[in-house]
Image: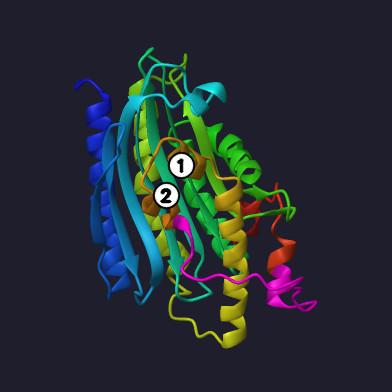
Amino acid sequence: MIELTKESIAEWFKELQDHICQELEALDGKEKFMEELWKRPGGGGGRTRVIQNGKLIEKGGVNFSAVYGATPAPLVQKGVLPEGEFFATGVSIVLHPFNPWVPIIHMNVRYFEASNGQYWFGGGIDATPHYIDKTDAAAFHKLLKDCCDKHNKNYYVKFKEWADNYFFIPHRQETRGIGGIFFDRLTEDNSMQKDDIFNFVKDVGFSFIPAYKLLISSKKDKPFNEKQKEWQLVRRSRYAEFNLVYDAGTKFGLETQGRIESILMSMPPLAAWKYNYQPAPGSQEAETLSLLKKGIDWISFAS
């Protein structure tokens, strides 16, 4: 068996980035990713890939990074990382669609290693529909459950609840979307060795394209009007609020001197903050708001 090292893990993440970019370009059918290579002052760097003004994707990014060096003092003080040297690598994806019927989707898979020997994996996939389709939500969650069940029958319930709690906007008292799965600090124990965890992370990574195809299949060509585009901008503002105020990845990037354009790649191209905006009772917009709650068993809506 080939020894699993931080270098080999980073190399696989680069290959995942390549695979997902190729698939997304084919799905979009119009635009291609532009790439920027960057270096971090303290050590390491990454490949930022952004696609804009496509037929399907209005703005999206598929970013790879591998950074290392002395652990920043703020992260030590907060207990995020131990004192010494650190290494962090991963792939982060956010896609903002042109069509308001198509959800925003996010995925992150990552690996951390400290000079004291500690390591862990993290990641997850979640979807943020502007309009929630219960059938699509059920299929999306079933796909993620199947991915989890291959490795540990307890993962889906645990990681689905983690996503519900993590992707929550306290000042709005609503979830960011329909959730998905979220996990962090996975490390070896009596049931899972390092290779086992990495195989799970790989399967999560390879689940992204099938999950996205599922969510766009019946929506990407659906007609929309100005009112629905307006609602899309309102929902994008909630997405921006979460990423700027609560997202741990955004904070980590800023605190480790990451490249600011890559960190803020997740921001939508346009968003709107309309004062005290209230959708009409009984509307599709009002129904979506009513479903932005923790603890919903989405799979129960399967047709």
Magenta span main SS:
loop
Q: Quadrant of the C terminus?
A: bottom right
Q: Nearer the viewer, residue 185 or 74?
A: 74
* Crowd class of label 2 (few under 14; some 14 to 19; many from 20; radius 10 Å): some
Q: Are marks 1 and 2 in contact (CB under 8 Å)?
A: yes
Give SS at disc 1.
helix
Is 226 situated above or below 11?
below
Classify residue 234 by image quadrant. Answer: bottom right
- Image spot of residue 254 (x, y percent): 46, 42
Q: Is residue 8 magenta?
A: no
Q: Which residues are magenta?
A: 266-287
What residue is shown with label 2? Answer: 263
Q: Nearer the viewer, residue 10 or 160?
A: 10
Looking at the picture, which amino acid does disc 1 mark?
Leu
Q: Look at 74% across and 73% down and name the residue there.
A: 277
Q: Which mark is residue 254?
A: 1
Tell me if 100 is positioned left or right of 258 in this view: right
Q: Look at 22% across and 37% down and name the residue there.
A: 11
Q: Nearer the viewer, residue 17 or 34?
A: 34
- Image spot of residue 265 (x, y percent): 41, 56
- Image spot of residue 17 (x, y percent): 28, 49
* Crowd class of label 1 (few under 14; some 14 to 19; many from 20; radius 10 Å): some
Classify residue 150 by image quadrant. Answer: top left
Residue 39 can be seen, yes or no: yes
Looking at the picture, which amino acid does disc 2 mark?
Ile
Q: Quadrant of the N terminus?
A: top left
Give SS at disc 2.
helix
Is 62 situated above or below 3?
below
Q: Is residue 271 magenta?
A: yes
> Which label lies toward us, 1 or 2?
1
